[in-house]
Image (tube, grey):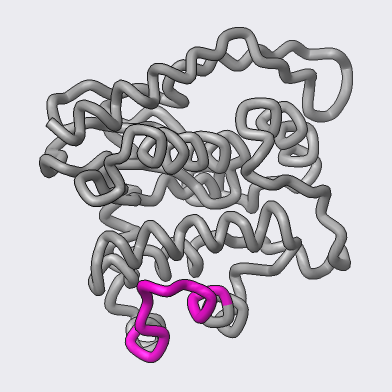
Amino acid sequence: MNVVPGTVQVWSDLGCPWSHAVVWRLWDARRRLGLEERVHFDHHAFPLELFNSEPTPKHRTDAEWPVASELAPRAGWQAWDAPEHAWPVTMLPPMEAVAAAKQQSLGASEELDRALRRAFWVESRCISLRHVMLDVAGECDALDVISLAEALDDGRARRAILDDWAVARGDEVRGSAHVFAPDGTNAQNPGIGIGWEDDGSPTGLYWIERDDPSAIEDLVRRAAG
C-alpha cells in the first residue's frame, strides 16, 4: 500500500460501528500526541454493501454498536431513534462525499468523515440523502459546501469509490477499519480483538477480547516520521 508520509490511510465503511470507534481513537491519539498539524487521515472506502450485495442489516449494527462503544465511549453513540424508514440503506453517497471533499484537502475530507459518522451514530440522521450530507458539510469549518455540492452533482468522486472497492477486494485490505502507516505498518482494528459466538440469535454474541490503545498511537507516530 502506497501511503504518503504525514498521513494515516484509513479504509472503512461509514456504517461500520467498529470503524467509528477506530476513527475516534485516531483523532484522540493525534490530539494527545500534539500531531494535528503533522498528520492527516486519508480516508478510503471499504464498501460493505458492495462486498455483501445487500445493505448492512440494521439488526446487525444494533448488536455490534453497544460493544464497539466500549472502545470509544466519548465518540457518542445512540440507538437509532428516527423512524425505521429513515435508516440509510446505502452508505455509498456519503462515502463519495468524503472522497469529493478530499479534492479540497485532506483536512476537509477527514472533518466531513468524522461529522458524517457523528450524524449517523449519534444523531440518527439519514446521511445517504443529499440535503443531509450538505447540511452536515455546512457544520464543518474546513469545507466549501458549494464546491462539494457541485462535486456530488457531477459525480467526479464516484470513480474513486469504485477504485477503492477494487483495491479492497485484493489481499492488502482485510476489513473495516484497516489502518496503514507510511512505513508499511498496518492493522485491521488496531489493537482490538473482537470475539463472536453463535448464541442462537440472528446476529450472534459479540465481545471485546483484547484492547491495546497504544497500537493506534503507534500508527499515528509512524505517520509523523
The image shows residue 184, relative to residue 50, as above or below, that is: above
The image shows residue 14, relative to residue 148, as above or below, that is: above
Residue at 28% over, 33% down: 170
Left or right: where 216 falls relative to 180: right
The image shows residue 135, relative to residue 216, as above or below, that is: below
Left or right: where 108 falls relative to 69: left
Tally the marks: 0
To which quarter of the image does residue 181 belong?
Answer: top left
Q: In which quarter of the image is the C terminus?
A: top left
Closer to the camera in the image, 128 or 114: 114
Closer to the camera in the image, 2 or 143: 143
Residue at 68% over, 52% down: 121
Numbered range of the magenta stretch? 136-147
Q: Does the magenta stretch include residue 33?
A: no
Closer to the camera in the image, 49 or 206: 206
Left or right: where 149 falls relative to 6: right
Q: Where is residue 165 in the image (x, y as percent from the top left)?
A: 34, 49
Q: Where is residue 108 in the image (x, y as percent from the top left)?
A: 34, 67
Q: Where is residue 35 in the image (x, y as percent from the top left)?
A: 27, 41
To which quarter of the image does residue 122 belong?
Answer: bottom right
Q: Where is residue 117 in the image (x, y as percent from the top left)?
A: 57, 55
